[in-house]
Amino acid sequence: MAYKDFLVRKTMDGGEKKQKQDLLHTRISPVDYDKVETVADLVENFSHCSIQARNIGLSATVFKKMLTDKDRPTIMLGLAGPLIAAGLRKVIRDMVHNNMVDVIVSTGAVLYQDFYAALGGGHYYGSPNADDTELRELFINRIYDTYVDEELFAEYDTMIGQFAGTLEPRQYSSREFISKLSETIDDEESILVTARKNGVPIFCPAISDSSIGIGLTEHYYHARKEGKAPITIDTIRDNYELTQIVVQSAGTAAFYVAGGVPKNYINDSIVMSYIFDKYTGGHKYALQVTTDSPHWGGLSGSTLAEAQSWGKVNKEANFAMAFVEPSVSLPLIYGYAYQKGFYKDRKKLHLKWAGDVLKELKVVK
């Protein structure tokens, strides 16, 4: 019996035929370079494709909604992974400069690599197949296929420790310390500098786990040795400060680049809103670009739908995930929003701090 004849034996009723027609309604649109002239065109075309191309397109659409929502949610950008080494420094800096981001939560490594670059440190074309024992003898550190200068790292780590020694010996949130550290560099291409000038707070809840932490530990060692009080970073104050931003915002949106501590930290700020007798309902929008997989159960790869069970993402939220490495996915999503100009009518967010208290959060023209 021919397979076609076998299928005929299965008689679908009217409801099944209608269901089949509904499911086989929209055709996939192949990428057509006769119609693609810009990154924005390509990403729009991706929305009509499949697999991760479609997810890139969906993520870009969610980002558009974040930027153009008339209720102006506070956009919180989580940064993890070797983003500066990957060549994304200017993309992230331009997101801040173009008012696409209101708050940054980052690993210490991302911030330190920006600081390193601002002082003249380079990221160099390398090879993942290099002889790492030879690189060690040359004081060259490898980040997959990128090289950095360990001698400069050592110099800049110490510089951070020496800077810490000039500050009043007390507890600081990572936001306050990073803002002060950014005043020691003057580079228009720096994420740290651009964030400070645009009033975008940067939090680094795992700051100890980085070269910044190494510099602060050196400061702590010398202060203790000399019988002086060292400065310390209070990460619980970070929680307190970030949650104030959440509860005073009209709404929140999350953009996660990779995962790690920044992703969970931003999500936990939603949970902690109860401390201020307010439940925000979770992020109104959320998107993530990552290579981590959900089936291992870790936070970095967990789906944004899973976050709904925790109340971190709103039950009615618009969200998307693209399982594409950030050096590829972030420039595409940013390029789409930038070339379409979705950020142009977005008003600024003004934050006024008095120590650890957020005295004012308001939208300004």
Image (cartoon, rainbow, N blue to C red):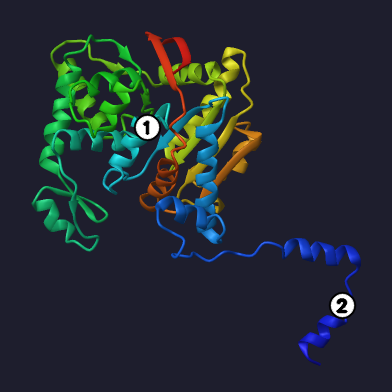
Q: Tag 2, which secondary structure?
A: loop
- Vertical placement of 39 versus 71: above or below? below
Q: Can you identify the residue that label 1 sits on?
A: 98
Looking at the image, is mark 2 or mark 1 nearer the viewer? 1
Distance (Cα) linking label 2 and label 1:
58 Å
Amino acid type at image mark 1: Asn
- Vertical placement of 67 versus 250: above or below? below
| Nearer to the camera, 50 or 218 | 50
Residue 345 placement, left or right of 140: right
Q: Name which of mark 2 and mark 1 comes first in the sequence.
A: 2
Residue neighbourhood size for the residue with mark 2, other residues' Cα within 10 Å, grouped as few (<14), some (14–19), many (≥20): few
Quadrant in the picture for the C terminus: top left
Q: Can you identify the residue that label 2 sits on?
A: 10
Q: Residue 162 in the image: x percent, y percent?
A: 14, 21
Quadrant in the picture for residue 133: bottom left
Q: Residue 301 in the image: x percent, y percent?
A: 50, 47
Amino acid type at image mark 2: Lys
